[in-house]
Image: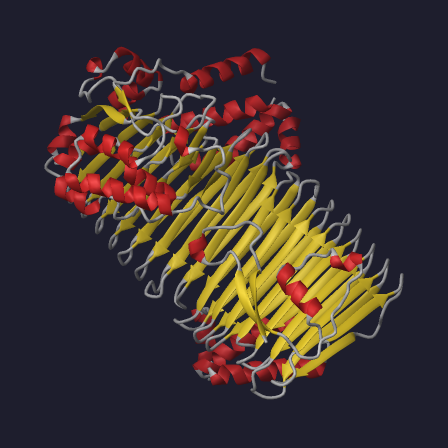
Amino acid sequence: MEQQLKNINTLPALTWNWLDVNCASFLAQRPQQVKPVQMAPEFAEIETGMGAQAADFAAQYCTDCHVVDVPENTEDKEEKTFQYVLSAEKPVVDVNLIHARKGSKVTVLESYTAGDDTPCFHGGLTKILADEGAQVRLVQVQLLSGNSRHFNDVGIKLGDNAHVEVVQAELGAARAFSGCLVLLAGYRSSFNADTVYFGDEKRKLDLNYIARHTGRKTNSEMHAAGALLGQSDKVYRGTIDFIRGAAGSVGHEAEETLLFSPQARNRTVPLILCSEENVDGQHAATIGRINEARLFYLKSRGLTEAQAKQLIIEAQFAPVIGKVSDTALQAAVKDYLGRRMQLD
Amino acid sequence: MSSPVKKEQLQEVDRSLYDFKDAVHPSYETDAGLTPEIVEQISREKGDPAWMRDFRLKSLEIYNKLSVPDWGPPLDGLNMKDIVTYVRPDTPMRGKWSEVPKDIKNTFERLGIPEAERKSLAGVGAQYDSEVVYHNVRKEVAEQGVVYTDMESALKGDYADMVRDRFMKLVPPTDHKFAALHGAVWSGGSFVYVPPKVSVEIPLQSYFRLNAPGAGQFEHTLIIVDKGAYLHFIEGCSAPKYNIANLHAGCVELYVAEGARLRYSTIENWSKNMYNLNTKRALVEKDGIMEWVSGSFGSHTSYLYPMTILKGENSRMEFTGITFAGQGQQLDTGAKVVHAAPHTSSHINTKSISKDGGECTYRSAVTIQKNAVESKSSVSCESLMLDSRSRSDTIPAMDIRNDDSDVGHEAKIGRISDDAVFYLMSRGISEEDARAMIVSGFAEPIAKELPVEYAVEMNNLIKLEMDNKL
């Protein structure tokens, strides 16, 4: 059974409809064996980047639920790892609820790979509640086959002095939709997001990141980088939203997209919404071709154009992939990218 | 520190400059509202050719089918049932100021238009409510073959075919609801044709004054700058403040031919009961250059995004704009550009200031089409917020469809730096003056692009707004 999720990844402030970036729709697959999730109120109230429809779908059709509850002032030295190898027969909808209590520290790794090239479905919902002084690192790697569908919905709420870092590699799936909303509610809370994406063939990527600052002296840094090949089509929405009262807050956002094909399409919509005077918000976007001088240099060293391009893409992704602590997964990412670029 | 007396004088002088109103005694006006009968009345009164009458009625049909935009500032206070779409002043169009009725002439004198014409303009068109009441172009400019006239005359005169070929072709009535409204009830406006290789050394100016309360102004501006020619066109507009909604839904269509250059400068200073839903669009051919300079100060609500279509190879555009929103204002402004040919380039540079609860939105769209290889676009927008009752949003979008172009976008929102204020205060300048200086400095890059009289006007407006804060 399939279900159309409409009005997902909605832009927090709408723009011209003809640009077709205000929201998206996604065809989700309902798994057979489900374990619906009833969330505690403190998790239920956390908004997510893809919006209520995606979050509700994940909660209703959940196949795998994990709760990570880190006690106060505890550091979880071992990474919490949830790795899924998907197949056509077994769609996965996972719900991950992470509560880092006061002063605690934890890293969670979620990875989604496919054993073969059969079409798979994955839907994911991760909610993070970081209490005062807590630190959470969420690493998500998606390497599904090129004919799969995947959505990844994240919601985060930060208490005073809490810090959350999100590292995402959205590299596979024919339809990859991802959203992340972080509520910087606590005084001096901070958020970092590093995302890499890769599009080739006829892939469609749809990304929506929102940093909502309500606490004083909060800080958000969102960086995204990607490469588009073939006839891939990508929409990146990134919003820094300063709510009145978020005095002294800072929000920075940057995106760099490399285009490798005349048929690829890139849409970027970076927003700053501001109802507080005493803030500093900046965004920058660079979209375009590969640096000719770099390409020439690499070719002059004996590399073919394809090898040189591959090297440049790997270099662009390296700072983010380097944050994946699981070395086997890191190698899998490199191998996956290598294969995809050859295919293209 | 500024004395209270000075502040009072500044407020008095500047408000009276725009807010004075004449007694309303039109020779003809339609009923309020929008019906096929009213559209036919306008067409009949203006003696439209048959095609224009049909065009108006078709536009009305489109208007009735289209929805109000769902993405911008609210338009709840605008009710078309209350808007009078056509108000003809009690005078025909004149070619000498001395022949313009005294009260209307006084209006334009207070706005400085006749003086500006004498000093620094090659021609002037002055519209009062729905019709142009004065039009004149310098003899030497006319002798160059430059045609500068009102739209009604152009519609029926030697250039009728040229007008028919281009009228609302760039901005079709299907574009959006208020373009359709314009198509149905337009009146007044200017037509300019600059022949090939003619350079109009001093600017032409059209000034639009809306006096009647509850009325709409729907002037149409059509400018064709032929191959290798140059023109600087200035548009000014204002209206007195009433306690009911007024509407401005003008339409500007600009054609820049091969190797031509057009600079289009505007300071919009509508009163704060005005809904300003204006549409401006330019089509630029090979090697052509389009330059926009735009200052948006007035109106209750604005939707204003001049659009440029870079159709010809190597064509380019520059957009320089500033928006200042004060109490009760929601000014949604920006620019759109479509790169539709190889080697095209665009540069958008905007600034906005919001204070006293005013809301500024910068909205833009840069589209690079598949065939627009080796194109470049850079966008820079900066917003300054002067208090936390105000709001400032930037909503840009980029749609890139080839791998052989470069697009860069930078945006910044912030406040007046405490360090800068402290530095100026340490040099003996009061805090208020320091803040005003910083705001003026912020606006300076835009002001320098304006003709000097308008730069002065803009600085006065900023000063007025800043003084109001005190």
- B340 w.r.t. B456: above or below: below
Residue B340, percent from left and from top: 32, 59
Task: Name the colouring of the figure.
Answer: secondary structure
Q: Is residue B355 above or below residue B175?
A: above
**Looking at the picture, how far across and down is residue B436, in whole percent?**
56, 27
Would you say A254 lies left or right of B299 here? right
| Residue B324 rendering spot, x and y as whole percentages | 50, 33
Of the pair A98 and B14, the residue shown nearer to us: A98
Drawn side of residue A103 relative to residue B34, left or right: right
Q: Which quadrant would residue A156 be assigned to in this image?
A: bottom right
Q: Residue at x 63, y 87 (%)?
A: A115
Q: Is residue B269 visible?
A: no
Q: Residue at x 65, y 75 (%)?
A: A141
Residue furthest to the bottom in view is A116
Left/right of residue B26 with respect to residue B366 in the rendered view = left
**Residue at horizontal 43%, vertical 33%?**
B79
Inspect this view and state whether residue A336 appears.
Answer: yes
Position of the N terminus of chain A, as image quadrant, is bottom right
For residue A110, what is the image quadrant? Answer: bottom right
Q: Does residue B309 sit above or below B322 in this rendering? A: below
Give the answer, above or below, for where A142 lies relative to B231. below
Q: How many marks?
A: 0
Name the spot of residue B62 as percent of width and height, x first.
32, 46
Q: Residue at x 50, y 67 (%)?
A: A234
Q: Is residue A306 left or right of residue B187?
A: right
Q: Nearer the viewer, residue A219 or B34?
A: B34
